[in-house]
Image (spheres, rainbow, N blue to C red):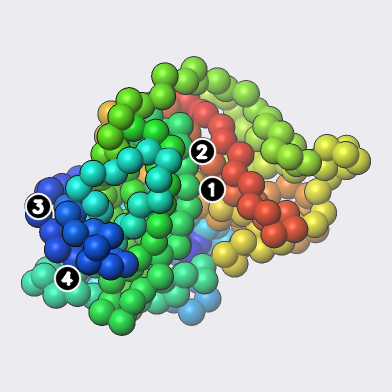
Amino acid sequence: MNRLVIAVAIASSLLVIPGCYSPTSEASLKESVEVEGMDSNHAEGMGEGHDQHHQQHHPDSHSEHSGDGPGEPQNATQAKLTVPSAIAANQPVALGIEIQDSTGNTVSEFDIVHEKKLHLIVVSDDLQFFSHLHPTQNQAGQFQVENTFPSGGNYTLFADYKPTGDAQRVSALKTTVAGNPPPPAEMTLTRSQTLGNTKVGLMLPTEKISAGEPITLAFDLEDTKTQTPVTDLQPYLGELGHLVIVKQSDSPTEADYIHAHPMPNPGSETLEFMTQFPEAGNYKMWGEFNRNGEIIAAEFWVTVQ
């Protein structure tokens, strides 16, 4: 996740097979399933502590882009998700993630990107639920984390990681939670949202967004008590903000995923993210910010023509 990147289509191949890997204990996942997701490579911009890859659109931009750049390593990997065979809503669930190479061996060496070896973005397929998790790696090389799914339905988990010496990758994994999903939510194009004492506003250069064209998305944060610009943002995972974007579809894939970071703009009260929407459609965005140790995630919809 390092300097402006944009998710471009590489289809995901999914397979559900019986599994035996236990991320926490054999008892907690005695009955489990494994979900396989093929990776989608990222062509990265220049970043501290990482290889130099092809840059997109702006020398100081941060976004994530699937696809191989010239001269990049192209070693195939796949991610395997292990979950209990029956998942109940509103109950903690142990998730296990294993990254394998093309021969099925566990990949255990990863670069730390934005302070973590693996970022796991969990969304419901209707895009009503969002969670940004950071699994920890055990001695065997597998990653473990707990998540609570709020309701029944289908979920997509985007595993974002960079094997040491290779390109950054995203793998889309799938799981289903028993029970009925929530009623459909109306898509609104509101441009501000208040979360606690913080009002987050989204500014677009135009409401007519075209697929394939670079665009700058700007966020203003205001303290609702003082009605003044927020000046106490703290870094979150090495940045003053993270922007996750997922395209609305029946079952999101790697091609529907974008993760961007703000462009350097010292002294500005506005955070600007440069990105590009690969296809026409509706996209939901979550802007993540850290105020005094509390992570807020403001959500917005945009329509791309």
Task: Look at 69% across and 38% down and name the residue there.
Answer: 195
Please give the residue where the numbered disc 4 appears in the rendered image. 101
Q: Residue furthest front?
A: 27
Of the numbered discs 4 and 2, the one sitting upstream in the chain is 4
Disc 4 versus disc 3: nearer the observer: 3
Q: Is residue 252 visible?
A: no
The three-letter code of the residue at mark 2 reads Met
Q: Position of residue 132 (x, y in %)?
A: 48, 52
Q: Is residue 186 visible?
A: yes
| Mark 2 neighbour class, 10 Å CA radius: few under 14, some 14 to 19, many 20 or more | many
Local secondary structure at mark 4: strand
Q: Alpha carbon of mark 1 to alpha carbon of mark 4: how far?
A: 29 Å
CB contact under 8 Å: marks 1 and 2 = yes
Disc 3 versus disc 2: nearer the observer: 3
Position of residue 261 in the picture relative to residue 122 (left or right): right
Of the numbered discs 3 and 2, the one sitting upstream in the chain is 3
The three-letter code of the residue at mark 4 reads Asp
Local secondary structure at mark 2: strand
Disc 1 versus disc 3: nearer the observer: 3
Q: Alpha carbon of mark 1 to alpha carbon of mark 2: how far?
A: 7 Å
Please give the residue where the numbered disc 3 appears in the rendered image. 17
Q: Quadrant of residue 32?
A: bottom left
Label at residue 243: 1
Task: Look at 83% across and 37% down and name the residue there.
Answer: 224
Local secondary structure at mark 3: strand
Local secondary structure at mark 1: strand
Please give the residue where the numbered disc 2 appears in the rendered image. 285
The three-letter code of the residue at mark 1 reads Leu
Quarter of the figure that contains the C terminus:
top left
Residue 33, placed above or below residue 284: below
